[in-house]
């Protein structure tokens, strides 16, 4: 069944480019057991904006002018190499349905490279008779042994060695026999489609998805660790996290327009109320910043992380707290960050002079960051060999330090209800820039695709990022040089998130250059 499996493997990502037309909501999850650790689904017949988006990305990123013809040719070549007298246009397209999927029943088989993964491929079919003819023709041509006719319940299928293929209602199913049988059981009983752990996050992904996935992160990470045959002792630090924060499943969705591609992540969280990123955190940063990030209620977020770290039982957690205390001057215990509110950071310029990086944070206690600033001042003087000067103009306390190589100094201080630290500029320029990022056309174009539901919390102008990366040595990396022609097709990255009740959503958008 090598040709048959290879054809389906190419079909899932490839037919989204070849296909045309559109379908109703998928019922593929009704053939999937409710306890699978991984399920992924793809649209095989996009239409309208989705089809235009795929063609745009194929041409502008990969330089493929006719992606449909390229994928069809690859499918035809795969069939011909295995001696199957069939083509996509004549023998697959007539019965191909709107969607395809794959589920992994267990990651345990990945522990041994000699074992096939317990996974099955599912494809909607529009013509069951034509699909069965394709199955019969492919098996008759490429099978090296005798193909056995078998059945499970009321479902007939064909068995070639340990691999089964057949039709369950209007769905073609291909995979190990055990996986085929559990698909039959799911179609007649409990399935992933009725599982609240699956439906709640996936419904939050929205509509018009080109592809989606549902994965139990803990199980996936454990499988990846096992497949690398790592020493259990070297990975035991992950155990408390796998049983805690990483144990909940995550849903991921892929969207696209002719000018941008997006990923939406949805997960169930507990006890975080209604939280949304605040666009003003980065829109008020200096215009021209090529990197900007905002974190609402940063103190609470850090406190939650520290609590999880302390309660996870990680070996060495106490040493981590001690190291943070020695490096920063404050003790990272519950309540130690109560003074820290919303925070944002930016980077402007790609080389010195002209390079500026800054951090701005709201504070509720004017004395809260005093020890932190004193510790940073000590470290800055020690590392630079320079003596710091008076606090920045208008600051209640802090320090200034000249850095000739940057064309500007380093300043940090508390001004009114803000903690501000700047490298290569002044705190006044960071707090009150001549023009703001929200008025920058590059930023406006980048965040437009996020939509009103996702206030931007991250912006990256990718050409500037790659320019800085090359100065750091990436230009000498052969992998980076090979990827650069594709990377140059992208203009920006933007992200935003919100938490409503128990559902956390994050959207990341990557935009193409004009």
Image: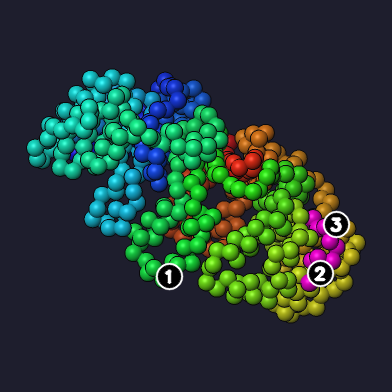
Residue at point 61%, 42% (across, down): 502
Q: Quadrant of the N terminus?
A: top left
Residue at point 16%, 28% (across, down): 137
Q: Position of residue 405 (x, y in %)?
A: 72, 69
Q: Position of residue 411 (x, y in %)?
A: 80, 65
Q: Earlier in the sequence, mark 3 or mark 2?
A: 2
Marks 1/3: CA–CA distance: 44 Å
Residue at the limit of the structure toward the left, as seen here? 146
Using the rendered image of the protein, determine whether residue 402 is visible from the camera's viewpoint. Answer: no
- Left or right for 356, reference 169: right
Q: Residues within 10 Å of mark 1 (few under 14, many from 20)?
A: few
**Residue 505 quadrant:** top right
Residue at label 3? 417
Q: Earlier in the sequence, mark 2 or mark 1?
A: 1
User: Which element type, helix, strand or loop, lies under badge 2?
Assistant: helix
User: Which element type, helix, strand or loop, lies under badge 3?
Assistant: loop
Residue at label 2? 370
Is residue 81 or residue 230 the one in the foreground?
230
Q: Earlier in the sequence, mark 1 or mark 3?
A: 1
1 vs 3, front mark: 1
User: Which element type, helix, strand or loop, lies under badge 1?
Assistant: helix
What span is colored magenta in the figure? 361-371
- Residue 234 tag number: 1
């Amino acid at each position: 069944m090598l040709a048959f499996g290879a054809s389906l493997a190419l079909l899932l990502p490839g037919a989204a480019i070849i296909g045309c037309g559109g379908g109703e909501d998928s019922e593929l999850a009704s053939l999937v057991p409710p306890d699978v650790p991984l399920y992924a689904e793809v649209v095989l017949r996009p239409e309208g904006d989705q089809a235009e988006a795929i063609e745009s990305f194929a041409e502008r990123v990969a330089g493929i002018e006719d992606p449909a013809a390229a994928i069809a040719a690859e499918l035809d070549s795969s069939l011909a190499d295995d001696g199957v007298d069939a083509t996509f246009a004549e023998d697959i397209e007539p019965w191909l349905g709107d969607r395809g999927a794959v589920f992994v029943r267990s990651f345990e088989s990945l522990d041994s490279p000699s074992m096939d993964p317990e996974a099955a491929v599912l494809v909607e079919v529009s013509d069951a008779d034509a699909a069965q003819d394709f199955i019969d023709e492919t098996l008759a041509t490429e099978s090296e042994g005798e193909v056995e006719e078998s059945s499970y319940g009321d479902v007939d299928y064909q068995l070639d060695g340990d691999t089964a293929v057949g039709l369950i209602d209007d769905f073609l199913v291909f995979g190990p026999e055990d996986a085929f049988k559990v698909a039959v059981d799911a179609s007649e009983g409990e399935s992933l489609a009725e599982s609240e752990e699956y439906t709640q996050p996936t419904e939050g992904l929205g509509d018009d998805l080109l592809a989606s996935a549902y994965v139990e992160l803990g199980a996936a990470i454990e499988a990846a660790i096992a497949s690398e045959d790592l020493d259990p002792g070297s990975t035991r630090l992950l155990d408390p996290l796998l049983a805690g924060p990483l144990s909940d499943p995550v849903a991921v969705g892929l969207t696209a327009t002719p000018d941008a591609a997006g990923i939406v992540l949805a997960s169930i969280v507990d006890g975080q109320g209604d939280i949304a990123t605040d666009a003003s955190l980065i829109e008020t940063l200096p215009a021209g910043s090529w990197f900007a990030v905002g974190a609402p209620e940063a103190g609470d977020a850090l406190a939650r992380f520290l609590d999880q770290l302390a309660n996870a039982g990680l070996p060495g957690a106490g040493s981590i707290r001690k190291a943070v205390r020695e490096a920063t001057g404050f003790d990272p215990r519950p309540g130690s960050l109560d003074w820290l509110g919303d925070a944002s950071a930016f980077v402007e310029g790609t080389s010195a002079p002209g390079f500026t990086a800054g951090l701005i944070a709201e504070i509720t206690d004017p004395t809260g960051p005093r020890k932190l600033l004193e510790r940073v001042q000590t470290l800055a003087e020690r590392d630079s060999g320079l003596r710091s000067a008076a606090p920045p103009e208008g600051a209640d306390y802090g320090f200034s330090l000249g850095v000739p190589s940057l064309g500007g100094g380093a300043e940090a201080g508390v001004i009114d209800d803000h903690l501000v630290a700047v490298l290569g500029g002044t705190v006044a320029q960071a707090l009150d820039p001549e023009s703001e990022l929200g008025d920058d056309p590059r930023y406006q174009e980048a965040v437009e695709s996020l939509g009103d539901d996702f206030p931007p919390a991250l912006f990256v102008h990718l050409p500037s990022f790659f320019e800085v990366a090359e100065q750091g040595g990436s230009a000498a990396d052969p992998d980076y040089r090979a990827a650069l022609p594709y990377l140059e097709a992208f203009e920006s990255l933007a992200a935003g998130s919100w938490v409503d009740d128990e559902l956390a959503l994050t959207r990341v958008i990557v935009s193409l250059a004009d």
